[in-house]
Amino acid sequence: MGWVGSFPQFLVFDGPPHRCAPHRVQGSRPPVGRPAHGGCDTAPMVLTTGAPSVDLAQSLPEIAPYARTTVRLHPRRGEPGVRDSHIGGPLWWPGAEPWPSCDEHKDINGRPLGPYPLVAVAQLTAADFPEIAFPAGTDLAQVLWCPDWHDQPHPEGWGQACRVFWRRAADVGEVLTEQPDPAEHWEYDSDMVPRPCVLRPERVVEYPWPEELPDGLRERLDEDAYDDVSLIPGCKLGGGMGWATTDMPFSLTCGGCGGPLALFMQFDTYEFTYGGREPDRFWPLEERHLEPGTPAFNAAREPTGMTVGRGSHAGLFLCTKDPTHPPSFFTQ
Ligand SMILES: [Zn+2]
Ligand SMILES: [Zn+2]
């Protein structure tokens, strides 16, 4: 495992950005108790971000060292299999291992409520995401959280109580067939419970939040043009996050060991914006025929159905020294 780049990054890239074969995400064995995809993964197989309006590396060459690659996950509603990479689907979870739960809830009289099973948020395999710095001996990452807000390891963190499980898929054995139904305790659309989505990963270059850049460089940014190349919106893996609501914390350090934190996953209410004079760069080329306001358009733009914060985004940050340390969550 290693870390590269001028900033602590959770993802390790060993070459130029490349497109992964999207079929790998779908190419796993059928999900437990269901047909492979039920014919309802209707999103295009490949989703592509538009070209940036400026070539920043040309117009401001000094910024080149700060370029970094993020993986747009492009979640789209579907029926991911239990062994697939996905958001909101069934997990490749050992049948013999208890499902984690949250027991920190109380009613208004202080009597304990729950425990409530954690919600399956995301599953990522090394085959689909080789850039993840998996801890030695693991090739499967699983993100679960309690949809309520809880204290965070980082004092400025704000949002869901997350757990990340690292496994070796070959060790899972018999898969847990009866997995908790989030709808028993939570509501899709009003709580932080993602709808099941397949992924269409796309590697895109982005530039950091301006506060992360040295003063001399930050002052030379053309703000309008910079918006177009920095901080890719939507659900993504690695890269950076915007801090327009709270400002960036003075230090982003692990609550466990004090090591640097780095963005592991961003969750976003919207995958792209629309309505400007030009089509938004982040509205995938393959979906630009969709009519705004229609159900198909809304499903493409708000695939997980989650309203993050007040309609913004949030980041799940991991310790770069040891990603098994407690994750911190920051909501904007
Ligand atoms: Zn909870
Ligand atoms: Zn740590």
Image (tube, grey):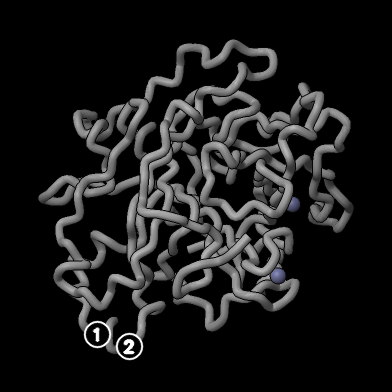
* Residue at 53% over, 62% down: 263
Asked if residue 82 lies left or right of residue 190, the reply is right
Q: Quadrant of the N terminus?
A: bottom right
The disc labelled 2 sits on which kind of residue?
Asp
The residue nearer to you, when weighing 34 against 127, is 127
Is ligand 2 closer than 8 angstroms to the Cβ of mark 2?
no
* Residue at 65% over, 48% down: 147
Q: What kind of element bears circle 1?
A: loop
Q: Look at mark 2 in the image and give the residue it sits on.
A: 215
Dot label at residue 219:
1
Marks 1,2: beta carbons within 8 A:
yes
Q: Is residue 232 visible?
A: yes
Across and down, in percent, residue 325 comes to 73, 63
Gap in angstroms between the C-alphas marked 1 and 2: 6 Å
Asked where in the image residue 94 lies, by quadrant, the reply is top right
Asked if residue 147 lies left or right of residue 71, the reply is right
Image position of 198 with respect to 111: above or below: above
Dot label at residue 205:
none
Image position of 268 with respect to 190: above or below: below
